[in-house]
Amino acid sequence: MHADVDGATRDQSPVTRFTNIDGRCVHLIGIGGSGMSGAAALLCALGAKVSGSDLKPFDGLGSLVARGVRISIGHRASQLDHNVDVVVASAAVGESNPELSEARRRGVPVVKYAELLGALMGLREGVAIAGTHGKSTTSGMCVHLFREAGLAPSFVIGARSEQLGGGSGVGSGPHFIVEACEYDRSFLHMRPRLAAILNLERDHLDCYSDLDEIVTAFGDFAEHVDPRGVLVCNGDDSNAMRAARSAKAPVETFGFSEGVDWRGVNLRIEGGHWRFDIVHADKIFLSSGLSIPGKFNVLNGLAATALAFHAGAQPSVIATALNTYAGVDRRLTWRGEGRGVTILDDYAHHPTEIRATLEAVASCYESRRTWVVFQPHQYARTRHFMQQFAESFDGIEEVIVAEVYGARESDDSADTVGSEELVSRIRRHGGQARYVARLEAVADYLADQLKEGDLVLTMGAGDVWKVADDLVERFCGPDAVRRSVEPVDVVPAGGTSEVSVSTA
């Protein structure tokens, strides 16, 4: 997939100044983000010379280094190669970033991550999956279905998958599958041929004022879907359907209700897994099941089925592929079991996601004393959904709340209400909760409390997975740990390692 992007095309971002990506020097600021790291791997596969920086080691760092990416930990102007052709900045990078400032001083073209994906999508038949929840899982599911159908897609999704070989890949087929994120209206840089809106509710209230503004943004996304393509929308979600009204492309609905175009029926749990039939055009289209837990994933499967069908996949192939899809990392991932203690990890960071995940855990692990370690993600989200978070943990024996993972926010945000207030709210709601700020201390506390038959679930979009790593090592042994951040030698800037560290 050589990026034969020409300045005369519809996308006028600086990316379009390239005749192709092959041999070009691309620097990614904030390379540790799940989407950014996937884009970096994709650029490598396209023949680009890739470098990048982030504030700290991250999930997938070692894999990128193995591909030849030069990564710096920390940001400083001197890390910007003098031959760099374009700089890609994640949504979390502010204008004061020294590398971004240096790029602007030199006149180096700067694009957002979303602009890069939009430019790459313009070279293929784009498949974009949007929604408040479930984007990574459904995007990965689409990749698996398309691959099994022989469609060989290229892709960038916001999570790693061992089954897919990572969070990105280059295929020989015409399709480019992308997780379409609504944060900062990033998905509006995309012009997909096929698209899905999985669900829609309040989130990212640091960049949207209210639900109506979010619906409007999703409506703009729907309008960008190629009129010759198809938009697949959750017919059981009134907000998603409001957004879909703006589409110029044909809209097909999915869900469990009467009247939707792709309907899940005969749902039942067999052997701990969901089984179901899909009705389309008033007849059984296929019968299948999922190896990943959660009724919400049946809905994701309906969306992926519709997209795969419109891409050319046969029903029998889709049915088999749904049943063999293994999911993506940090989505109710089984991390290990030792001394009778089961350890799971999940990315849930919104009240709706927490409730859905806990429901899935309860259906798969009955009669277990459950401990939840929750790391809130962003002070703004924690403040906006404080009461909803407090009510999300009903029925849990004890919730341990770590300090908020600030992510994109400034240090000033730490002065606002956060984890300690959430613990107070959980207690007032009748739950058991305690505040343990540091993740290391959380693991120490649990190691003294856990008994045979217990289940631990770490939850959050930050680095709470470190607690799962620590507990797996303690209860299952060091050989059982699959590190989320691969060990890599890190040396001072200017050293000989492929990874350097900056203190600036």
Image (cartoon, grey):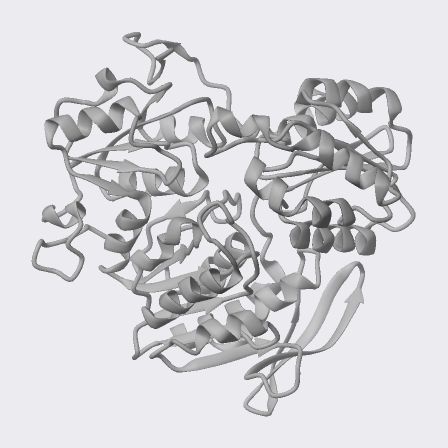
Looking at the image, which residue is at 66% across and 77% down? 256
Q: Quadrant of residue 424?
A: top right
Q: Residue 442's spot in the image, x, y percent?
A: 74, 23
Specify whether residue 154 is in view: no
Most extreme residue toward the bottom is 282
In the picture, the quarter occupied by the C terminus is top left
Q: Residue 159: x percent and y percent?
A: 50, 44
Whether 74 is drawn above or below 332: the answer is above
In the image shown, does 82 or 153 lie closer to the viewer? 82
Residue 449 appears left or right of 244: right
Q: How many marks?
A: 0
Residue 482 placement (x, y as % from top left): 61, 30
Q: Residue furthest left?
A: 8
Q: Is residue 191 above or below residue 54?
A: below
Which residue is drawn at the image coordinates 68% and 27% (left, top)? Answer: 467
Nearer to us in this view, 85 or 391: 391
Instruction: Name the residue rendered at 67%, 57% in the picture.
Output: 291
Task: Tell me: 115 left or right of 65.
Answer: left
Residue beneath the point at 48% across and 28% down: 58
Instruction: Locate residue 441 relative to residue 384 in the image: left or right.
Output: right
Displayed quadrant of residue 297: bottom right
Q: Could you tell me residue 452's position as x and y percent?
A: 91, 32
Quadrant of the image occupied by residue 236: bottom right
**Residue 93 in sight in this render:** yes
Q: Nearer the viewer, residue 413 or 221?
A: 413
